[in-house]
Image (spheres, rainbow, N blue to C red):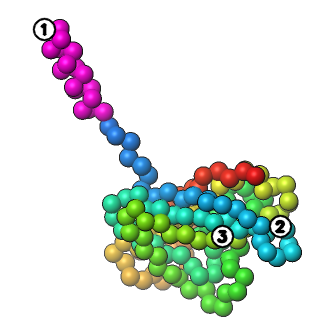
Amino acid sequence: MNKLILIIIASFTLFSCETNNPEPYSFKIESIRDSLSEDYKLFIATTSLTNNSKDTLKFVTMSCMWDIIYSTSNPCISVRGPEACFKNIPLLITIAPTKSFHRDIILFMHHHKDREGFKLGINIIKMDNLSYFTGLEVFSKPHNGLENEIVWSNSMAE
């Protein structure tokens, strides 16, 4: 009888445990390298945004103004857009489940020693059931059905 009770309790405990579901999106700094320019205050972070959910992720980014999409946890490091950019337009990025979006992000160091320990954040502006938006205000707050979500990367220290 005691064995039966133990088996029932063990079975209940085993089947009632919740599994740890991963976050729907993960943002990772894959690597960091110095810029090819002579300005050693610039460096490049190779990043990946992975869709861990079962749904396709559609979000908006900008072709030039990366500083409204990406942020850093270190106030002495800021995001720069691409050097040669002639038209700042919204871009719709689609990531299928289990797939990733990769981007090299240019970062500026205000002081050379301040490269130690930082995270990058990406402001995900979902485009679920919406085919357009009216302006850049969507990057600062939810607007017309758009949902903002900042996802932080792993910590990078050199």
Q: Are marks 3 and 1 in contact (CB under 8 Å)?
A: no
Decide: few, some or many residues near mark 2? Use Cα within 10 Å; few <14, some 14-19, many ≥20.
some
Mark 2 = which residue?
A: 41
Decide: few, some or many residues near mark 1? Use Cα within 10 Å; few <14, some 14-19, many ≥20.
few
- Name the kind of residue labelled 3 in the image: Ile
Mark 1 = which residue?
A: 1
Q: How many marks?
A: 3
Residue 146 appears in the rendering: no
Q: Position of residue 107 (x, y in %)?
A: 73, 67
Decide: few, some or many residues near mark 3? Use Cα within 10 Å; few <14, some 14-19, many ≥20.
many
Mark 3 = which residue?
A: 105
Instruction: Specify whether 128 is left or right of 38.
Output: left
Q: Position of residue 57 (x, y in %)?
A: 40, 68
- Name the kind of residue labelled 1 in the image: Met
Residue found farthest to the top? 2
Q: Secondary structure at mark 3?
A: strand
Q: Secondary structure at mark 1?
A: loop
Q: Secondary structure at mark 2?
A: loop
Residue found farthest to the bottom? 86
Using the rendered view, name the quadrant where residue 33 is placed: bottom right
Q: Residue at x 51, y 64 (%)?
A: 49
Please say if 7 is above or below 127. Answer: above
Please say if 5 is above or below 56. Answer: above
Q: Which residues are magenta?
A: 1-17
Q: Residue at x 37, y 78 (%)?
A: 130
Mark 3 to mark 1 CA distance (whole Å): 64 Å
